[in-house]
Image (cartoon, rainbow, N blue to C red):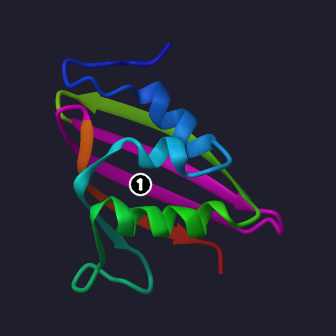
Amino acid sequence: MGTAARSGFDTEMLRRGIEGDSPATLLSLYADDAELRVVDRNTQPSAPRVLHGRDEIGELLADVYSRDMTHKMERCVMDGDSVAFSESCRYSDGMRVLAESMITLRDGKIVEQTMIQAWDE
């Protein structure tokens, strides 16, 4: 059973969105004005990739979910309007990706997310 805090955010829905085969459920968790910052080898902390709004975030998610890979939410912790989770991904060729995210909620929707990711090279 999912955890729905006073914010109305359901961590089980987050799991279903991450582990699903399309971005629709995951995208539905974002507010219209959400911001996603991505930090990785190519977009380092001094110049992260920043996506503004559900449309830009949706384009990223559509690209990710079009790939031949699986996604699994490993761990999730929620405290009030803050959520942190670990996600592991695996491409069909065996390459792995690990992502850690910190989320801020408003009215049960994601308004800010910082994701730090690393992958096999």
Comparing 73 with 26, the one in front is: 26
* Rendered position, 78 above or below 89: above
Residue ID for mark 1: 100
Q: Residue at x 25, y 53 (%)?
A: 32
Please indicate whether residue 104 sits to the left or right of residue 4 in the image.
Answer: left
Residue 93 among those drawn in magenta: yes
Which residue is rendered at x = 73% and y = 69% of the image?
A: 95
Task: Give, as a single range, the part of the protein colored magenta.
Answer: 82-108
Q: Looking at numbered disc 1 in the image, what kind of residue is underneath it?
A: Glu
Image point (68%, 47%), residue name: 21
> Main structural element of the magenta stretch: helix, strand or loop?
strand
Nearest to the observer: residue 9 or residue 53: 53
Residue 38, above or below 109: below
Asked if the stretch drawn in magenta spans residue 71, the answer is no
Query: What percent of the width, then of the height, locates residue 71?
Result: 63, 50
The quarter of the picture where the C terminus appears is bottom right
Task: Give coordinates of residue 16: x percent, y percent.
Answer: 56, 34
